[in-house]
Image (cartoon, rainbow, N blue to C red):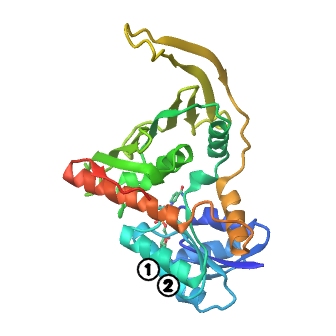
């Protein structure tokens, strides 16, 4: 049985607690939070787990195999580094670290210690994103032309990150399923901060080596909740609406036929065919991810979102910050 410790039992941590408690092949040995009241609360719910306010208790236990870090972003690096140095495998929440330098150090350390380092880019584990990957793999989308993603609501304003690091990271995970973020060549971002120092509304524009453009609009200041990604391809167009309970994806046979051998006069022909709503399993992403983490520790699987993937994400978000501050397009080196 793989022994797991979960650090951070605030808003998101209890979801990990619940999912790992139900995952085969592992046992939750510890729950940890600086806040003693949270430990007491969960102790009642999970009497078989040891709850502690001291992260060191986890590090000092030779029986513990892995830690799951679900604390605020600025603490990801020191906690993950200490866990790796203590010989524990790590699954860390998004964003992996607050800086690229820290991400680099964790990737190198995990490699040196021969330990698993995974990052929770949750959407990489959703059935909807798996379906999008399948549609693309089957050639039904055709060449991707654009991605336009919106993630807005009256959201929880974070203290230590802006809205792009907190929300747009999910859109970037979805975008990565269409076109690997490794091939981003340009980043442009703009945003506005009305209440704090960090942008509460952000726009992020990415250009890929292939010519694909992707745009993300993220906001904590919207009266309505929208979680929608449009993916336009030459053969079809996908609308992914994550607020829909079951019919999350619609594939539209819509597009433009343009005979490029006769560019003049310009007469695009419009195609408007059927709409397909594929069936999607209602599996919780964290359940899939928890089982995958255990498989990776056992050497049965390769990380779906590795430390390297987490690092690439941080690199793009760091470039977005720079672009936002300097109001210019940032060039990115291809990974
Ligand atoms: N993947 C997702 O969809 C998703 C959703 C929400 C949050 N998150 C991520 O989860 C992380 C936590 O977010 P949250 O909203 O739960 O935050 P939160 O503030 O509600 O909870 C964080 C908890 O961590 C505890 N903590 C902080 N430092 C600690 C330490 N050194 N040792 C032990 N406990 C410590 C705090 O006491 C608090 O209870 C963030 O990285 C966030 O980005 C991910």
Ligand 1 near label 1 (Cβ, under 8 Å)?
Answer: yes
Is residue 167 found left or right of 84 in the rendered image? left
Image coordinates of residue 205 in percent, x first then y, are: 36, 43
Residue at x-position 59% and y-position 92%: 60
Question: The N terminus appears in which quarter of the rendering?
Answer: bottom right
* Along the line of sight, the residue nearer the viewer: 129 or 151: 129
Q: Looking at the picture, how far across and down is residue 72, in whole percent? A: 44, 68
Could you say where residue 240 lies in the image, as x and y percent from the top left?
57, 35
Please tell me how many numbered marks the rendered image carries: 2
Question: In the figure, 94 relative to 264: above or below?
Answer: below
Q: Which mark is residue 127?
A: none
Q: Nearer the viewer, residue 124 or 254?
A: 254
Residue drawn at x 67%, y 68% as measured from the top left: 293
Give the Cα separation between the discs numbered 2 and 1: 6 Å
Where 213 falls versus 11 (above or below)? above
Residue 188 to residue 259: above or below: below
Query: Could you tell me which secondary element the residue under label 2 belongs to?
Result: helix
The answer to whether the residue labelled 2 contacts the one labelled 1, judged by CB atoms less than 8 Å apart, is yes
Is residue 62 shown to the viewer in this render? yes
Mark 2 within 8 Å of ligand 1, using the beta carbon: no
- For mark 2, what is the residue? 82
Q: Residue at x 26, y 52 (%)?
A: 323
Q: Give me the residue at 58% from left, 51% from top.
A: 123
Which secondary structure lies at badge 1? Answer: helix
- When asked about the image quadrant of residue 224, the answer is top left
Left or right: residue 166 compared with residue 61 = left
Left or right position of 167 against 301 = left
> Does residue 157 show up?
no
Figure quadrant of the C terminus: bottom left
Mark 2 crowdedness (10 Å alpha carbons): few <14, some 14-19, many ≥20: some
Q: Which mark is residue 78?
A: 1
């Amino acid at each position: 049985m793989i022994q797991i410790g979960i650090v951070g039992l605030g808003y998101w941590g209890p979801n990990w607690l619940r999912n790992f408690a139900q995952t085969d092949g592992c046992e939750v040995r510890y729950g940890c939070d600086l806040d003693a009241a949270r430990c007491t609360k969960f102790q009642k719910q999970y009497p078989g787990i040891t709850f502690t306010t001291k992260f060191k208790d986890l590090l000092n236990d030779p029986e513990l195999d892995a830690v799951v870090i679900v604390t605020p972003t600025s603490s990801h690096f020191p906690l993950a580094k200490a866990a790796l140095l203590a010989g524990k495998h790590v699954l860390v929440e998004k964003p992996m670290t607050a800086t690229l330098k820290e991400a680099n150090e964790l990737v190198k350390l995990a490699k040196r210690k021969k330990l698993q380092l995974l990052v929770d880019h949750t959407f990489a584990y959703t059935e909807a994103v798996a379906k999008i990957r399948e549609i693309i793999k089957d050639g039904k989308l055709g060449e991707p032309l654009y991605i336009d993603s919106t993630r807005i609501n009256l959201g929880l304003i974070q203290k230590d990150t802006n809205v792009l690091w907190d929300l747009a990271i999910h859109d970037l995970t979805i975008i990565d399923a269409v076109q690997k973020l490794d091939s981003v060549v340009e980043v442009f971002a703009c945003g506005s901060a009305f209440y704090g120092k960090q942008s509460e509304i952000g726009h992020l524009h990415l250009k890929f080596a292939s010519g694909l453009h992707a745009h993300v609009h993220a906001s904590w200041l919207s009266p309505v909740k929208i979680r929608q990604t449009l993916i336009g391809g030459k053969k079809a167009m996908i609308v992914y609406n994550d607020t829909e309970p079951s019919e999350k994806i619609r594939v539209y046979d819509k597009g433009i036929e343009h005979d490029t051998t006769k560019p003049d006069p310009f007469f695009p022909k419009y195609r408007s065919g059927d709409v397909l709503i594929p069936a999607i399993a209602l599996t919780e992403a964290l359940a899939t991810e928890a089982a995958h983490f255990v498989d990776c520790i056992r050497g049965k699987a390769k990380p779906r979102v590795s430390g390297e993937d987490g690092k690439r994400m941080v690199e793009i978000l760091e470039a977005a910050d720079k672009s936002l501050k300097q109001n210019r397009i940032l060039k990115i080196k291809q990974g």
